[in-house]
Amino acid sequence: VQLQASGGGLVQAGGSLRLSCAHSGLPFTNEAMGWYRRTPGQQRELVAALGSTGNIKYEDSVKGRFTISRDNAKNMVYLQMNNLKPEDTAVYYCNRPYIPFVSWGQGTQVTVSS
């Protein structure tokens, strides 16, 4: 499995970013996928999960602001992030939720200035 997140950047509070995850080698076409983030000194936390049947879960702090989606034809998973806050600053990764694959890819840095 190969995972590559992109689309991060520097944005002011209240702004938006759309992260993209290109994936290959998933065991199943509709493999559950999610977005994690990690800040320095902290463990990765799962912020959005898209299940194999389409069910979606969000971490409480991003509910109503983040939207996860996928395009199986393009082997892509997305995270639309609106109304960004400084506390959203982190490196974002895509991976399978709850039971991540060994390979995480490089992640993409999101920095939100106040």
Image (cartoon, rainbow, N blue to C red):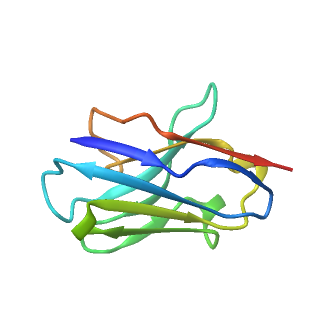
The image position of residue 96, as x and y in percent, is: 31, 50
Whether 39 is drawn above or below 67: the answer is: above
Q: Nearer the viewer, residue 100 or 80?
A: 80
Instruction: Report the side of 63 relative to 104 (left or right).
Output: right
Q: Nearer the viewer, residue 93 or 50?
A: 93
The image position of residue 34, as x and y in percent, is: 39, 55
Whether 93 is drawn above or below 64: the answer is: above
Count how many numbered circles sit on residues in the image: 0
Instruction: Report the side of 110 relative to 5 (left or right).
Output: right
Instruction: Report the side of 92 relative to 64 (left or right).
Output: left
Instruction: Report the side of 47 relative to 97 (left or right).
Output: right
The image position of residue 76, as x and y in percent, is: 33, 60
Q: Residue at x 43, y 34 (%)?
A: 106
Whether residue 2 is visible, yes or no, is: yes
Whether residue 52 is visible, yes or no, is: no
The image position of residue 60, as x and y in percent, is: 61, 61
The image quadrant where one finds the N terminus is top left
- Image-quadrant location for residue 4: top left
Whether 36 is drawn above or below 48: the answer is: above
Q: Residue at x 51, y 37 (%)?
A: 44
- Image-quadrant location for residue 84: bottom right
- Image-quadrant location for residue 30: bottom left
Whether 50 is drawn above or below 55: the answer is: above
